[in-house]
């Protein structure tokens, strides 16, 4: 069972990716938000939660793929309502996937056979790209596309 280290590793990947996005895009987050639409943000959160529950519990889709669907719909909603954040969203997703791949490569070097021992490929395709299972790579990418522009949204 994963411990606190898994949570810390996840935050470390996100923090490194956030700094990388700021360097690639060339700006820091501003405290003044443009066109803040709190109702739309809550609609994204509530609709995403409902769609996750429907996909996971009603259609029996595994939680990882349900999360990817939730993050994808949230990212599309943000991009449609704030087209100026689409570039930030894409760069955030790419940087999150790259940082996660680098971290998993380092973990794989330190502990050989980590992916085969840690991941259960029973309900997944079992495809590993850049030392990260495809499902996790998609999750990290869409996690980055959703959360990178969220503060500015």
Image: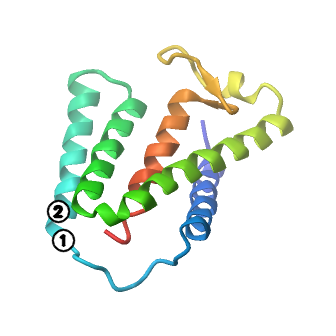
Residue 140: numbered disc: none
Residue 55 at what x, y percent from top left? Answer: 25, 29
The answer to the question of whether label 2 and label 1 lie on touching residues, with beta carbons closer than 8 A, is: yes
Quick check: 62 above or below 139? above
Quick check: 43 above or below 34? above
Q: Is residue 72 left or right of residue 46?
A: right
In percent of the image, x 24 and y 46: which residue is there? 48
Circle 2 Cα neighbour tier, 10 Å, few/some/many (<14 / 14–19 / ≥20): some
Residue 132 at what x, y percent from top left? Answer: 64, 33
Q: CA distance from mark 2 to mark 1?
A: 5 Å
Q: Is residue 12 left or right of residue 111?
A: left
Say which quarter of the image contains residue 42.
bottom left
Q: Nearer the viewer, residue 6 or 27?
A: 27
Which quadrant: the N terminus? top right
Residue 37: numbered disc: 1
Say which quarter of the image contains residue 109.
top right
In percent of the image, x 52 and y 76: which residue is there? 27
Q: Which residue is mark 2?
A: 40
The secondary element bearing badge 1 is classed as: loop
- Furthest-bottom residue in view? 32
How many numbered marks are there?
2
Circle 1 Cα neighbour tier, 10 Å, few/some/many (<14 / 14–19 / ≥20): few
In percent of the image, x 24 and y 36: which residue is there? 53
The secondary element bearing badge 2 is classed as: helix
Residue 14 at what x, y percent from top left? Answer: 56, 57
Q: Nearer the viewer, residue 52 or 7?
A: 52
Quick check: 142 above or below 26? above
Residue 26 at what x, y percent from top left? Answer: 56, 73
Say which quarter of the image contains residue 82.
bottom left
Which quadrant: the C terminus? bottom left
């Amino acid at each position: 069972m994963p411990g606190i280290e898994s949570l810390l590793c996840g935050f470390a990947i996100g923090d490194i990716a956030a700094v990388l996005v700021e360097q690639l895009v060339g700006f820091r987050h501003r405290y003044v938000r443009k066109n803040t639409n709190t109702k739309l943000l809550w609609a994204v959160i509530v609709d995403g939660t409902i769609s996750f529950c429907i996909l996971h519990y009603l259609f029996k889709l595994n939680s990882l793929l349900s999360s990817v669907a939730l993050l994808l719909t949230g990212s599309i909603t943000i991009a449609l309502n704030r087209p100026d954040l689409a570039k930030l969203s894409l760069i955030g997703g790419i940087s999150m996937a790259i940082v996660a791949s680098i971290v998993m490569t380092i973990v794989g070097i330190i502990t050989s056979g980590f992916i085969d021992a840690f991941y259960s490929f029973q309900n997944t395709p079992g495809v590993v790209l850049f030392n990260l299972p495809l499902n996790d790579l998609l999750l990290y990418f869409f996690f980055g596309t959703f959360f990178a522009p969220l503060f500015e949204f």
